[in-house]
């Protein structure tokens, strides 16, 4: 069965609105979750590392005020795309790293965001 | 230059053929992942390697740490194997997140 879930699986929103994407670890507690983004015909790119109980670590070029990450519990991380623009349209995927296996990541099914 | 290079970018083969996808990387790594992405976008982790060889069903993955190279093989390929196969590395001592190749788009024709 699925180890990681994401919600919603797809979302269409108007420019200027905010969208929240949830990533849940179903089988284990995860102190670390990752958020990736994939533009059409491009490879996945790491956006940020979400750490339970502390601030997320953002990759260079990713605006932390635009992509708000909250990792409030050991099983849930949320990514909020604030004031979304059409260029934010992308496929957003989270992954979860079990605490005991630092080389392992389990991926969520992804969320396709379309901003009109 | 991307830290992770995959070849070929696109591959079309006939059902039953033996498939090889290659991945080269330029950094020291602690692990390498092979992932499968279907048209809907969801990603499935196939293998995680830090040395040697792993086999799961018709899939085989190998890695040569000295040469910074890994291969994914599919034996007796089937149309349901059609997908994008992605190589990703976890840098040793670097960022915790994975660095991905651009993927190999595989089509197996009946």
Image: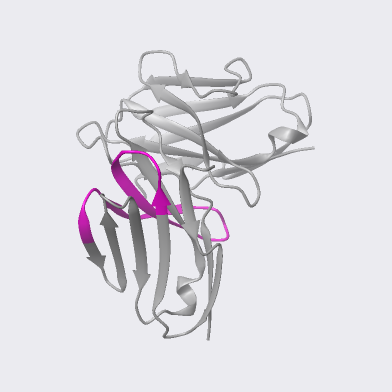
Considering the whole magenta stretch, tell me its main secondary structure. strand
Q: Is residue A103 left or right of residue B4?
A: left
Where A81 sits versus A87, above or below? above
Q: Nearer the viewer, residue B92 or A101?
A: B92
Q: Is residue B32 magenta?
A: yes
Q: Is residue A66 left or right of residue B105?
A: right
Q: Nearer the viewer, residue A114 or A60?
A: A60
Picture coordinates of residue A44 (x, y %)? 53, 43
| Residue drawn 34% across the image and 45% down it | A3
Name the quarter where the N terminus of chain B is drawn. top right
Picture coordinates of residue A36 (x, y %)? 51, 36
Residue extending farthest front: B67
| Residue drawn 31% across the image and 25% down it | A31
Q: Quadrant of residue A23?
A: top left
Q: Nearer the viewer, residue A68 or B89?
A: B89
Q: How is the model colour-coded?
A: one colour
Picture coordinates of residue B16 (x, y %)? 41, 85
| Residue drawn 79% across the image and 29% down it | A15
Q: Is residue B109 magenta?
A: no
Magenta-colored span: B24-53
Q: Quadrant of residue A34?
A: top left
| Residue drawn 24% across the image and 31% down it | A99
Picture coordinates of residue B56 (x, y %)? 26, 66
Where B74 sits versus A102, above or below? below
Q: How many marks?
A: 0
Q: Nearer the viewer, residue B68 or B18?
A: B68
């Amino acid at each position: 069965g699925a180890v990681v879930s994401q919600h919603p699986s797809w979302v269409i929103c108007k420019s200027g609105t905010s969208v929240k994407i949830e990533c849940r670890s179903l089988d284990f507690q995860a102190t670390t979750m990752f958020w990736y983004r994939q533009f059409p015909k491009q490879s996945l790119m790491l956006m940020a590392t979400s750490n339970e109980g502390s601030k997320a670590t953002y990759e260079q070029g990713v605006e932390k005020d635009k992509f708000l990450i909250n990792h409030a519990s050991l099983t849930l991380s949320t990514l909020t795309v604030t004031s979304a623009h059409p260029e934010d349209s992308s496929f957003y995927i989270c992954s979860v790293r079990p605490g005991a296996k630092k080389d392992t990541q389990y991926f969520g099914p992804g969320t396709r965001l379309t901003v009109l | 230059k991307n830290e992770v290079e995959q070849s070929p970018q696109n591959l079309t083969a006939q059902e039953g053929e033996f498939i090889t996808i290659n991945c080269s990387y330029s950094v020291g790594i602690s692990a390498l992942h092979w992932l499968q992405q279907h048209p809907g976008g969801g990603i499935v982790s196939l293998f995680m390697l830090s040395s040697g060889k792993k086999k799961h069903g018709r899939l085989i993955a190998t890695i040569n740490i000295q040469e910074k190279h890994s291969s994914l093989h599919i034996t007796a390929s089937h149309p349901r194997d059609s997908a994008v196969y992605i190589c990703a590395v976890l840098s040793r001592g670097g960022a915790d997140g994975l660095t991905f190749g651009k993927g190999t788009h595989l089509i197996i024709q009946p």
